[in-house]
Image: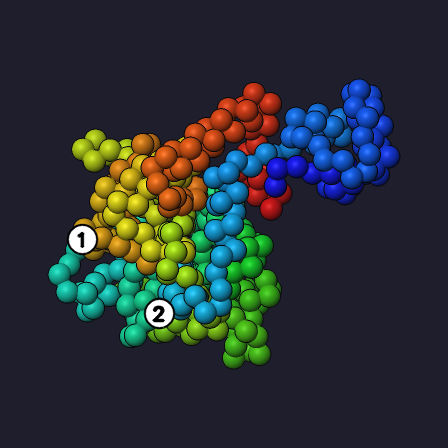
């Protein structure tokens, strides 16, 4: 809104109206309780209480409104987005490759899946989207930017090893995010594999298998041999059905950047995951300080496509620069509003730099969530 009264400001700052009125007097402004204050005055008074006021532009206000637009009847089922986490060498990359390869050869006609940072596979009637960057670094980087992209986390634990430091870290991050965990006990082909020992150790972290009276799904796999993959996919579908994941496909698209790069031939390339709406070639988008018209869209099978729905990962071309992973993106009404939103982000970044507020590490950010 454009203005705020003295009483409202007092409530926002959690101080008494009298204190506000006193501060105003010290600034040479005589005010009453229901008097409206302009933006500059509010900023001045707030500063006296060590609070920085964030003034939202017209574009930003619109963006906020977009988030609350959906009526229940506009929501349609969408596929789950899955991240694979676990200790180094426990088999995350092998598992992601194995899932992609099994499904591409048996399901999809035509081919080689290109690496665009995420891919979708079919499990019977259902689709599942996998984020192709394993490890909790990607997971926390996105969370630190406020992006909750994951619906289900697959925690890979090697059956011939056990719960390791990064396993515990992953458990903590995922629990903090409130995301359901499926434990994939990997390397069951190894002679020294001991699945019961893994279950015992996981139970110590409150991940108790269903057959022991808990509610955590365990799937035994050999990522290397491709064993147990179909079962794991079925488990993912089961867990996701309980979540009743939905999104409105009939809206201006918005979502999260999974990966981005500056390609010599193609310019800035971003892999995005659509969370809401349908993204079309020709849409005007803004993502952080990047903006532009979507010139082309390429799916995980390497095909050029014209539109993409929620939970679909796509590579997009046409942005002014490569946005950061974890940054959100939005389709705006036109080129001008998209550019304005990006420009405002740039100004905000500059301001923060000047106020020296930007010296925050990822870890600090994560702690504050
Ligand atoms: P990441 O660090 O978690 O991504 O682990 P990788 O996928 O790179 O796997 C680490 C090592 O374990 C590699 O040498 C893999 O070939 C091996 N590996 C992964 N999965 C299996 C499995 O199911 N069985 C066996 N025997 N080896 C595996
Ligand atoms: Mg790896």
- For the image shown, how many numbered marks are present on the structure? 2
Residue ranking furthest to the left: 110
Q: Is residue 16 visible?
A: yes
The residue drawn where x is 54% and y is 52% is: 173
The residue that appears at 28% across and 35% down in the rendered structure is 268
Compare residues 62 and 3 and report the one nearer the observer.
Answer: 3
Q: Residue 194 or 105: which is nearer the viewer?
A: 105
Residue 250: x and y in percent read: 37, 60
Relative horizontal placement of residue 41, taking residue 2 as reference (left or right): right
Q: Nearer the viewer, residue 130 or 247?
A: 247
Label 1 sits on a secondary structure element that is: loop
Q: Earlier in the sequence, mark 1 or mark 2?
A: 2
Please state if 217 lies on the left or on the right of 280 as rendered.
Answer: right
Residue located 79% across and 23% down the image:
29
Q: Is residue 17 left or right of residue 177?
A: right
> Which is closer to the viewer, label 1 or label 2?
1
Residue 140 x/y as whole percent: 49, 46
What residue is pinned by disc 1? 303
Image location (x, y in percent) of residue 60 = 50, 40
Q: Which residue is mark 2?
A: 233
């Amino acid at each position: 809104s454009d203005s705020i009264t003295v009483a409202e400001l007092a409530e926002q700052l959690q101080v008494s109206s009298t204190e506000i009125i006193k501060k105003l007097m010290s600034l040479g402004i005589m005010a009453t309780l229901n008097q409206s204050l302009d933006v500059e005055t509010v900023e001045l008074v707030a500063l006296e209480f060590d609070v920085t006021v964030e003034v939202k532009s017209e574009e930003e206000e619109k963006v906020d409104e977009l988030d609350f637009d959906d009526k229940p009847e506009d929501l349609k089922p969408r596929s789950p987005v899955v991240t694979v986490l676990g200790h180094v060498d426990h088999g995350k990359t092998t598992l992601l490759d194995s899932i992609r390869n099994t499904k591409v050869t048996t399901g999809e006609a035509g081919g080689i899946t290109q690496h665009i940072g995420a891919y979708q596979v079919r499990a019977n009637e259902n689709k599942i989207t996998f984020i192709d960057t394993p490890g909790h670094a990607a997971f926390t980087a996105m969370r630190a930017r406020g992006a909750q992209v994951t619906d289900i986390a697959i925690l890979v634990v090697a059956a011939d090893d056990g719960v390791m430091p990064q396993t515990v870290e992953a458990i903590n991050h995922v629990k903090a995010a409130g995301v359901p965990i499926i434990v994939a006990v990997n390397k069951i082909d190894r002679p020294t594999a001991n699945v019961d020992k893994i279950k015992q150790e996981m139970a110590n972290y409150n991940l108790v298998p269903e057959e022991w009276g808990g509610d955590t799904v365990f799937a035994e796999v050999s990522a290397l041999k491709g064993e147990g993959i179909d079962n794991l996919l079925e488990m993912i579908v089961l867990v996701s059905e309980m979540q009743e994941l939905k999104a409105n496909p009939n809206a201006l698209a918005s979502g999260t950047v999974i990966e981005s790069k500056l390609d010599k031939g193609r310019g800035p390339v971003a892999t995005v995951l659509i969370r809401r709406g349908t993204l079309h070639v020709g849409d005007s988008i803004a993502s952080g300080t990047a903006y532009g018209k979507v010139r082309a869209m390429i799916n995980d099978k390497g095909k050029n496509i014209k539109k993409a729905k929620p939970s679909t990962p796509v590579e997009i071309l046409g942005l002014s620069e490569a946005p950061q992973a974890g940054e959100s993106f939005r389709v705006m009404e036109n080129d001008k509003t998209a550019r304005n939103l990006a420009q405002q982000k740039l100004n905000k970044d500059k301001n923060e730099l000047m106020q020296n507020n930007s010296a925050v590490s990822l870890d600090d950010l994560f702690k504050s969530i």
